Amino acid sequence: INNTGGSGSNTVTLSNAGTTATTLNLTNGIFSIGNNVQFNIANNGAVNATSGSLASGNAAGTINFLGTGTVNATATLNFWNVNLPAGSGGVNFGSTGNPTIHNELVINNNRFVDVNAPFYANTSTLVYNSGNTFLAANEWFANVQSGRGVPHHVRIGRAGTNNTQLSFDISNAYRQCLGDITIGDGTGSGFGLSLGTNSGGDLRVSGNWLRYPNGVFTTNNRAVFFTGNGN
């Protein structure tokens, strides 16, 4: 996308929903994928953003990384939804710029964030939808209170995919959630959250705690600290 028109005339709108590309270059102007519209990045693909950007809000649509992928941003790059569909490969959101999730980052079976996490806006949710036990890693940085890699809301499991379990494994460092934690969903089964098995593998929550009847919480003798300002 390299549209140098003035404001209001510098937007390129996706005309073919479900388009797949190896590289999305946002050089100048605005790329509008569209509300509830998907754009695919092929395996070993990349999103590169210099002076261009995605449209604001839900007009940024959903970007599916179909395999290993990278994000290279030199400034703020605002995603609406990023989906890592079931398959293989991780996505590295890069160490430069401010790639930011504004609605959802969804991690499905056998997918992961590689090395560098995105930033999470205060409207966003990190969704674990693996259908198996997922070990918390680079999508959610440990021992960090804010900034890159610290999610706002976190949801473990959603309707349609059973048995998603999030584990802090042998971690001896806390993880901070700046918003709400939700374990399970209104339907389905086998959802759960397990804290670290080593001392210090705790959870800090600034928002609300919601555990559905089909969600299991395993403390492993660790603590949950509520760090918000509410009552």
Image: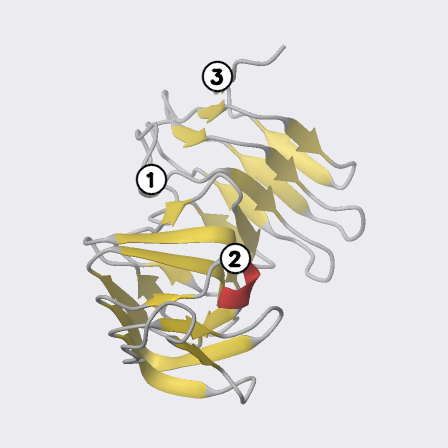
Look at discs 3 and 1 and give the one toward the viewer: 3
Residue in the picture at 27% in, 80% down:
2
Q: Residue at x 62, y 26 (%)?
A: 208
Query: Mark 3 or mark 2: which comes first in sequence?
Result: 2
Residue at x-position 61% and y-position 52%: 164
Q: Circle 3 — which element?
A: loop
Task: Place residue 43 in its image quadrant.
Answer: bottom left
Measured from the top left, where is residue 155 in percent x and y?
59, 44
Disc 3 to disc 1, C-alpha distance? 17 Å
Q: Is residue 156 above or below residue 76?
A: above
What residue sits right under mark 2 in the picture? Answer: 57
**Residue 166 horizontal/vertical position (percent):** 53, 44
Q: CA distance from mark 1 to mark 2?
A: 25 Å
User: What residue type is disc 1 on?
Assistant: Phe
Name the residue nearer the viewer: 227 or 60.
Answer: 60
Secondary element at tag 1: loop
Pick the residue in front: 96 or 30.
30
Q: Which residue is mark 3?
A: 227
- What amino acid is at disc 2? Gly
